[in-house]
Image (tube, grey):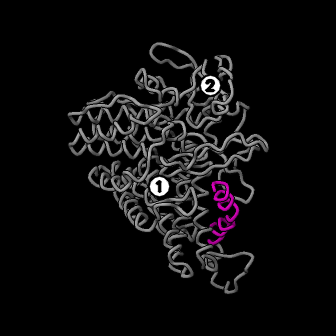
């Protein structure tokens, strides 16, 4: 099913051409004859099939190199506290995000995420605006609108949580001069919350195709958004709608594998879309070692792979785990070995069916790190293909899990800590710690600060390298938990990114 969804997603995206050419065509009032070979936004989007094609273009943007395919995980991981530089090979724009309190407005990685988010938003706006014209399948149309609202909310949350005040667009762009000034962050949050509530009312519990948004995904993202916005009661209400609807998988590692293919040889299909997955972005390994460097994620033959394993692996080695995250793990926590590889560990075990090969210091092109006084080379094991192949260049097909049930449980724990019920916070934390392959001792919590500290620890060891730490730091810093509960992990860091220079140069309404 994953392959079918991806193929459909990338093969129908001629509609993306519509999104860019519509500016010219829609403004010419003399064009009253429709060219069937070159549809416009006025002649297209008349059926549920056509509307879904537009929706697929939004998913395509999400999966592109601008966003989850590559640059998105860098903006989060470089600004969080769970990564360090792999060495001199880390490119300057990524190193700047990692090392500087605030990046330059010209930072290319930051700019890519900004552009990708607004591309998603513009495409979602078009789908939402055209939906009232679709009457051939109203039930399906409404689900499509719910998916578009979910995706628009996700993109706006990326923007508001990392940039603060940003331009707010709710209609598709029809003119090159349709610029808007920045709106207050409160207005952005209002739209996001409205989108997610409406999406939750429209979306099914189980998607018609794997990889599409569901009611659970909308409520889980709503909980995350409300927490970041400071409303823990509203967050708890949303998250409780997700509680019990998903299940932690026994094997922790099943959350971070996926299809790996070399040529025509399918090495593994992994455990994607499992019972713990609330929302994940689908990627596909064609076995051709290619990546869509055009960054748009479109076209019938476009590659739908992701660069995560390559960037964080032993050859490119741009990113390694930080000493801080390594030392966060309790001595006997099995999640340490599920989360990291270090020299001496076995790779190429083919899912435990082969003897494998030991990693060596000389064979790892990364800087060393230190845990409990032991210095050696380490890389992230999450989202790695090293158990199946160690070829030097391999963009892969491992789906990126944007929301999983363990995160929902730990968000609920934080809500309970914030609303004065630390014993309930412990209950949710202990559900995570009791996973069959983890089986860590339960915690007992009796005060708010104790519960917040426990949440900080458990989110670190459970969700390390999953692109949530940056947002957590921003939220906890604003509440004064640094240094009240812990030292600030990124002291001096500026709260928000600057607006990209390319945007301020083009948009006269942004000062």
Q: Which mark is residue 154?
A: 1
In the image, residue 247 above or below residue 508:
above
Left or right: 98, with 328 as reference point: right
Label 2 sits on a secondary structure element that is loop
Which residue is rendered at x = 64% and y = 59% of the image?
5
Query: Is residue 122 highlighted in magenta?
Result: no
Which residue is rendered at x = 55% and y = 32% of the image?
95
Left or right: 369, with 181 as reference point: right
Q: From the top left corner, tell me how far across and down residue 228 is, in percent.
A: 35, 48
Front-lying residue, 98 or 141: 141
Which residue is rendered at x = 59% and y = 69% of the image?
52
Q: Residue 356, located in which quarter of the rendered image?
A: top right
Q: From the top left corner, tell me how far across and down residue 369 is, in percent.
A: 52, 20
Q: Which mark is residue 314?
A: none
Image quadrant for the N terminus?
bottom right
Residue 377 in view, yes or no: yes
Image quadrant for the C terminus?
bottom left
Residue placed under numbered mark 2 in the picture: 88
Label 1 sits on a secondary structure element that is helix
Provide the residue span drawn in magenta: 1-23
In the image, residue 249 above or below residue 349:
below
* Marks 2 and 1, the one that precedes in the sequence: 2
Which residue is rendered at x = 61% and y = 30% of the image?
318
C-beta proximity under 8 Å, tags 2 and 1 = no
Q: From the top left corner, tell me how far across and down residue 247 is, in percent.
A: 44, 47
The answer for how far apart the CA atoms under marks 2 and 1 are is 33 Å
Residue depth check, mark 2 versus mark 1: number of the one nearer the observer: 1
Q: From the top left corner, tell me how far across and down residue 221 is, in percent.
A: 42, 53
Residue 151 in view, yes or no: no
Q: Estimate how packed mark 1 is, as few (under 14), some (14 to 19) or many (20 or more) residues with alpha carbons within 10 Å.
A: many
Q: Estimate how packed mark 2 is, as few (under 14), some (14 to 19) or many (20 or more) residues with alpha carbons within 10 Å.
A: few
């Amino acid at each position: 099913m994953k392959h079918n969804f991806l193929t459909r997603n990338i093969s129908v995206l001629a509609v993306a051409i519509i999104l860019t050419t519509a500016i010219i065509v829609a403004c010419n009032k003399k064009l009253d004859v429709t060219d069937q070979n070159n549809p416009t936004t006025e002649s297209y989007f008349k059926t549920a099939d056509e509307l879904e094609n537009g929706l697929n273009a939004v998913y395509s943007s999400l999966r592109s190199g601008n966003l989850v395919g590559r640059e998105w995980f860098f903006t989060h991981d470089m600004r969080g506290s769970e990564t360090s530089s792999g060495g001199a090979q880390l490119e300057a724009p990524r190193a700047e995000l990692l090392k500087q309190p605030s990046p330059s407005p010209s930072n290319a990685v930051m700019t890519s995420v900004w552009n990708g988010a607004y591309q998603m938003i513009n495409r979602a706006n078009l789908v939402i605006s055209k939906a009232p014209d679709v009457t051939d399948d109203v039930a399906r149309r409404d689900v499509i609108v719910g998916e578009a609202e979910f995706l628009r909310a996700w993109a706006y949350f990326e923007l508001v949580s990392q940039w603060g005040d940003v331009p707010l667009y709710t209609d598709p762009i029809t003119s090159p001069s349709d610029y808007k000034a920045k709106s207050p962050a409160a207005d952005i949050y209002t739209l996001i919350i409205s989108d997610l509530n409406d999406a939750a009312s429209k979306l099914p519990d189980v998607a018609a195709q794997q990889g599409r948004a569901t009611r659970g995904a909308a409520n889980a993202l709503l909980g995350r958004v409300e927490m970041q916005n400071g409303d823990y009661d509203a967050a708890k209400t949303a998250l409780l709608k997700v509680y019990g609807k998903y299940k932690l998988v026994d094997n922790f590692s099943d959350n971070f594998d996926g299809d790996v293919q070399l040529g025509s040889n399918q090495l593994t299909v992994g455990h994607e879309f499992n019972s713990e997955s609330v929302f994940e972005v689908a990627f596909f390994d064609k076995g051709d070692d290619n990546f869509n460097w055009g960054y748009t994620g479109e076209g019938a033959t476009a590659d739908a792979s992701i660069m995560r394993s390559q960037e964080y692996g032993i050859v490119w080695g741009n990113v390694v785990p930080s000493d801080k995250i390594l030392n966060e793990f309790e001595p006997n926590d099995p999640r340490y070995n599920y989360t990291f590889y270090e020299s001496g560990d076995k790779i190429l075990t083919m899912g435990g069916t082969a003897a494998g090969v030991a990693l060596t210091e000389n064979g790892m092109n990364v800087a060393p790190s230190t845990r409990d006084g032991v210095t050696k080379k380490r890389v992230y094991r999450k989202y790695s293909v090293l158990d199946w192949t160690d070829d030097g260049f391999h963009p892969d097909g491992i789906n990126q899990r944007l929301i999983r049930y363990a995160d929902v449980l730990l968000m609920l724990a934080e809500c309970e800590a914030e609303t004065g019920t630390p014993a309930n916070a412990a209950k949710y934390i202990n559900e995570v710690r009791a996973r069959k392959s983890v089986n860590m001792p339960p915690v007992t919590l009796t005060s708010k600060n104790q519960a917040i500290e426990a949440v900080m620890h458990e989110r670190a060891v459970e969700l390390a390298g999953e692109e949530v730490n940056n947002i957590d730091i921003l939220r906890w810093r604003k509440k004064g938990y640094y240094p009240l509960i812990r030292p600030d992990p990124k002291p001096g860091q500026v709260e928000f990114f600057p607006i990209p220079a390319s945007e301020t140069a083009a948009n006269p309404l942004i000062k």
